Image (tube, helix red, strand yellow):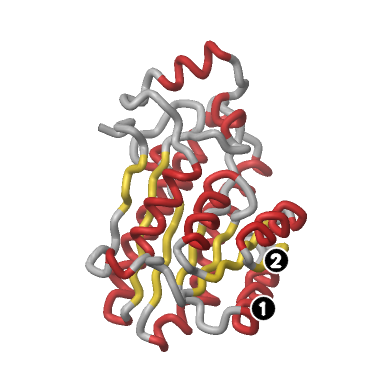
């Protein structure tokens, strides 16, 4: 019960790594608000863990502002904020990615961190406590070809994590990131371009431990970094990648 008595918001928490984080947080005693575009899936997870579901577009200022207002009424003080929602573009030469896809990647992966900071950091700073976790990627540390703008968005997130950590530390707010390698999530096929045994084998050959990241892996790492056990850790970008970045 490392998160007993704490309240948490997980964006993109209805599936994949986000759902793994939600389940772990709830198992460790947190009250969790699942913010996701897919309201039906979010409500299903919420029923399973005794949490709250809300349809949210993290790239929209109005939607994130509404999330903050709802969270204040439902959760009171928000102790933990996990910026997990993310999208990618299909693998292709960098110059062939459409402007629409570029804008979507940066709106969801980057602008969302700005927006949640705008609406949640002030209350955390006033309270003198809080933990923010940004779900980045090994793509931001060791980029793969043909995912250029996705890689860049995750590199942005890692830099944002570090500068947020430095600025917010005097206020008692910690900011960290986790960097998973690809896993069995809705984005896996998009990362690989197509899902075949041959492509999976090629992808897995780059991971020394020999398997994909799981939602449980992400939940365990996130729980530690957002718990009081990690009270001396801020500005870290923890690689949860089976040795992919070594």
Percent across and percent down for residue 147 are 50, 32
- Which residue lies under the disc numbered 2? 54
Q: Nearer the viewer, residue 179 or 75?
A: 75
> Visible in this render: residue 14?
yes
Q: Does residue 49 lie above or below 117 as drawn?
A: above
The residue under the point 38% across, 55% down is: 177
The residue under the point 63% across, 66% down is: 50
Q: Quadrant of residue 32?
A: bottom right
Report how many numbered discs are placed on residues in the image.
Answer: 2
Q: Does residue 122 lie above or below 109 as drawn?
A: below
The residue under the point 59% across, 55% down is: 13
Q: Residue furthest top?
A: 198
Percent across and percent down for residue 87 are 59, 44
Q: Helix or strand or loop: what does disc 2 sit on?
A: strand
Q: Nearer the viewer, residue 165 or 17?
A: 17
The dot on residue 166 is none
Q: Are marks 2 and 1 in contact (CB under 8 Å)?
A: yes
Q: Nearer the viewer, residue 205 or 157?
A: 205
Give the mark nearest the N terminus, 2 or 1. Answer: 2
- Which residue lies under the disc numbered 1? 70
Q: Quadrant of residue 226?
A: bottom left
How crowded pointer 1 is (Cα within 10 Å; few <14, some 14-19, many 20+) is rated as: some
> Visible in this render: residue 96?
no
Q: Quadrant of residue 230?
A: bottom left
């Amino acid at each position: 019960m490392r998160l007993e008595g704490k309240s948490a918001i997980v964006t993109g928490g209805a599936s994949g790594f986000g759902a793994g984080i939600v389940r772990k947080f709830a198992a460790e005693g947190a009250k969790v608000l699942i913010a996701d575009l897919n309201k039906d899936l979010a409500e299903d997870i919420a029923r399973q863990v005794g949490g709250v579901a809300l349809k949210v577009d993290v790239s929209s200022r109005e939607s994130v502002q509404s999330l903050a207002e709802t969270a204040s009424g439902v959760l009171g003080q928000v102790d933990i904020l996990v910026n997990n929602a993310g999208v990618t573009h299909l693998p292709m030469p960098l110059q062939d990615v459409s402007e629409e896809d570029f804008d979507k990647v940066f709106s969801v992966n980057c602008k969302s961190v700005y927006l949640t900071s705008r609406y949640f950091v002030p209350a955390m700073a006033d309270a003198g406590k809080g933990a923010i976790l940004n779900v980045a990627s090994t793509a931001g540390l060791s980029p793969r070809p043909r995912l250029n703008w996705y890689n860049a968005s995750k590199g942005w997130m890692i830099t944002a994590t570090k500068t947020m950590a430095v600025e917010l530390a005097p206020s008692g707010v910690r900011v960290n990131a986790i960097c998973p390698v690809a896993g069995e999530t809705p984005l896996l096929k998009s990362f690989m371009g197509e899902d075949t045994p041959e492509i999976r084998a090629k992808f897995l050959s780059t991971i020394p431990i020999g398997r994909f990241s799981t939602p449980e892996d992400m939940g365990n790492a996130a729980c530690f970094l957002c718990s009081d056990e990690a009270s001396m850790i801020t500005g870290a970008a923890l690689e949860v990648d089976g040795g992919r970045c070594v």
